[in-house]
Image: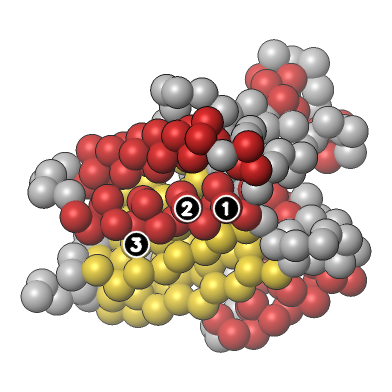
Amino acid sequence: MKYKYISASETGLKRARNEDSVGVFDVPTGLLVIVCDGVGGNNAGEVASGLSVETIHSNFIGSELNDHLEKIKGAIINANHLINEKSKNNIDFLGMATTVELLFLNKDSAYWGHVGDSRIYIWKNGKLKQITKDHSLVQKLIDEGHLTLKEAEKHPNRNIVMRALGDKAVVDIDLSKQKLNAKDELKFFVCTDGVTEVITNDEIEELLMLKDLGQISETLKSKIEERGAPDNYSFVIIEKIGRWSEQ
């Protein structure tokens, strides 16, 4: 399958700088998408997110492994190690951390790695499904039965992340894959929590019904800013447009 895409990364209306980083790369066997959100409140979040995108990209394309999930795992582990090393060796970077979403799409499958509370969605034949689970305090409280989904939307600690690159020497990564059907109408949506803090899953599903990726992007940005854009916000929208031909 072949894909087209559009991406955006904005500072928002209440932040002094953008700590998100986005990379979309056409590689010989598919499309590699990386979205990172430097964890707010830590030093040099923008350095951590940028370093993560750069390191993951170079490690992924440089890997000789045939297993794509192992390539994803290795690339994220290496990014975590580098962030930790730079944090130890430079006082300006002490405590820096970032979330990471890595999505790789090839001729017939989607592969992903996930750490933090940014998200990956798949939109198939008009229906949206979130395929990552937030590593956040609020999600933990939901899982334990202390909060409802409705209560979680307004919880004062909804931005507390429980897992991020740079937090620990060893990072715990969610890894998964999914076979894709060439007959399905498919879009993927990868975003930071600056989007999902103000836009609901139902709204994302409805926006992805639109045919033009540029229109989806501009409408989404307008909605986020109409609602105050309290955080940096970034997203990538990917659409299947045909079959991938091997090179």
Quadrant in which the N terminus appears: bottom left
Place of residue 30 in the rendered image (x, y in percent of width and height, measured from the top left): 25, 66
Residue depicted at x 45% and y 34%: 85
Place of residue 43 in the rendered image (x, y in percent of width and height, measured from the top left): 69, 42
Tag 3 residue: 32
Under mark 2, the amino acid is: Leu
The answer to whether residue 103 is visible is: no
What's the distance in space between the residues labelled 2 and 3, CA to CA? 16 Å
Residue depicted at x 24% and y 68%: 27
Return the residue nearer the eye: 184 or 108.
108
Apparent side of residue 173 relative to residue 142 in the rendered image (left or right): left
Q: Cβ–Cβ below 8 Å for labels 2 and 1?
A: yes
Q: Cβ–Cβ below 8 Å for labels 3 and 1?
A: no
What's the distance in space between the residues labelled 3 and 1, CA to CA? 21 Å
Q: Vertically, is 170 above or below 76?
A: above
The secondary structure type at the circle numbered 2 is helix
Under mark 1, the amino acid is: Val
Q: Callout 3: few (<14), some (14-19), or many (20+) C-alpha neighbours within 10 Å?
A: many
Place of residue 215 in the rendered image (x, y in percent of width and height, measured from the top left): 64, 85
Residue depicted at x 51% and y 35%: 89
Q: Earlier in the sequence, mark 3 or mark 1?
A: 3
Tag 1 residue: 47
Under mark 3, the amino acid is: Leu
Q: Callout 1: few (<14), some (14-19), or many (20+) C-alpha neighbours within 10 Å?
A: some
Tag 2 residue: 51
The secondary structure type at the circle numbered 1 is helix
Residue depicted at x 74% and y 20%: 141
Which-is-in-front pick, marks 3 and 1? 1
Apparent side of residue 55 relative to residue 224 in the rendered image (left or right): left
Q: Earlier in the sequence, mark 2 or mark 3?
A: 3
Return the residue nearer the eye: 193 or 21.
21
